[in-house]
Amino acid sequence: MKKIQSILLALLCLMLFPSLLIAQLERERVVTDQPEELIFMAPRNINLYTVEPLSKGELHYSIMHTFGEVNGGVSELWGIDQGANVRFSFEYGFGEQFSLGIGRSSMDKVYDLSSRYSLIRQRQNGGSPVSVTVIPSIGITTGSYGFLDVDYNLSDRLNFNLAVPIARKMSDDLSLQLVPMITHFNRVGFELSVADPAENTYYSIGVGGRFKIAPRTAITFQYIPPITDAENLDHNIGIGIDVETGGHVFQMFFTTSRALNESYLVSSGNGDFLDGGYRFGFNINRLFRIR
Amino acid sequence: MKRLIRLTPILIIPALLTLLPDRLPAQKFMADDGYVEFVSTAPLLEFEGVSENLTGLIDLETKMVDFYVDLNTLETGIQRRDRDMRNSYLETDKFPFAEFTGELQTDFDPNLQETQEARVNGTFKIHGVEREIDVEGTLTPNGDSIQLEASWVVLLEDYNIDRPGVLFYQLAEEQTVNISIQLVKTDN
């Protein structure tokens, strides 16, 4: 009975003095839905392009390296002495969906021109469950092939690639992506760093992902299976770590391939991961604001 | 049961009283378009995260002061920095609001049409961490509204907001929060 009296007394007080109610404002979100952001820390995840778009006016500079295979041992400083394949690139965001990039890889002295179009963005509340980006690119090898019976003309030097990353941020920590891609070389031969000098067209479905182990640190991986019916292709396997430092993203990894752009990722040979046929590599990504 | 019957008039009378007009004129002032900025001042770089979606309430009857902002509306002028701020620092998916609830410690006369110093003691919450703070500011009555200006300092470490070890943004450990809002009298 005393309990009932206490409740009634409390009700009485509240009715007499309604201001005793702690009338805090109800918390309402202004932004209730927006695209998933930072599905990946950078436009690259190890070597594969990601769905991570640039904003309008952003310039992304990256420099990527892969060294020799670590199975050379200490005398080769685990591959470092063998020199690096280096790719540096600039990519500029012309809008929230579209960017253009130009890069240069030392392997086969390739210049590549690429564009990225963010077709679909994963939304936080409903909408698309995945982000999809379309990335066509064209490459031109600029090596000297005068030693060949038939020299390369301009058309011979061209290669074309289409990659379509499809990614989903599964949780705050885990993001995954599939990257169907196809590459065509107008001309191939032993002089190029492709796996099969008789095969012009290569295709695969790459898999990539990252798992955050701290707010700005993530474990990363990539896998590109050798689907093309070609000689000497092997599994492209990469594992790494991303460290975001506020403006820069450092990416350090071990991978089985020297390749650093899509055309060669799908077409060049790979070492045997289980036999030390992997190599150290790292990327440095920097974003600038141009306007 | 008999006691309940005896209590009935006690319940009915105040219930009827609540139907009468308010004893006092409205004492609540609200707005949802206030300005808030988080100023980061490092030796080589100063930048602000700015929002114009600060929502606030002052109840002069209870002396309660209540503010919050959806941190997803903060912008620093660089979209990549905004994304980093939301995802890596403030983790706005988990902790969408910065909020302050406190009690006015100083006297305030809404009829005195001049700027009056004010001090509020309360709880500031951001990144899921609550801390009791004192906030100094001013209140300026202006017809049916009150202009509020206030400022205080937030140490990111106090709220478990981790900064990168290598500072390329030069994000300052100490952030100055400035708020400015015109609160309008409400009948609610």
Image (tube, helix red, strand yellow):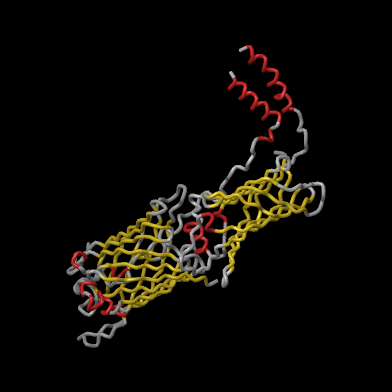
Q: Quadrant of residue A11?
A: top right
- Is the residue A178 above or below the residue A151 in the image? above
Q: Is residue A51 visible?
A: no
**Farthest-out residue, top:** B2
Numbered circles on residues, count: 0
Q: Quadrant of the N terminus of chain B?
A: top right
Please tell me whether residue A245 is drawn above or below residue A103 in the rendered image: above
In-image side of A106 versus B51 (left or right): left
User: Which residue sits at x=57%, y=60%?
Assistant: B75
Q: Position of residue A254 (x, y in %)?
A: 29, 67
The percent position of residue A246, horizontal first and vertical second, equals 47, 66
Residue A170 visible from this viewpoint: yes
Question: Horizontally, is A275 left or right of B137 in the view?
Answer: left
Q: Residue B135, image x and y in percent? A: 66, 53
Q: Residue at x 41, y 58 (%)?
A: A214
Residue at (64%, 14%) from the top-left corner? Answer: B3
Q: Dividing the picture into quarters, in which one does residue A2 lie?
A: top right
In the displayed orientation, state which residue is furthest to the right.
B112
Viewer-proximal residue, B68 or A4? A4
Along the viewing direction, whichever of B37 and A57 lies nearer the viewer: B37
Q: Residue at x 59, y 61 (%)?
A: B175
* Nearer-the-camera pick, A261 or A256: A256
Quadrant (top left, top right, bottom left, bottom right) of the C terminus of chain B:
top right
Determine whether, in the image, residue A6 is placed left or right of residue A229. right
Q: Position of residue B27 (x, y in %)?
A: 74, 41
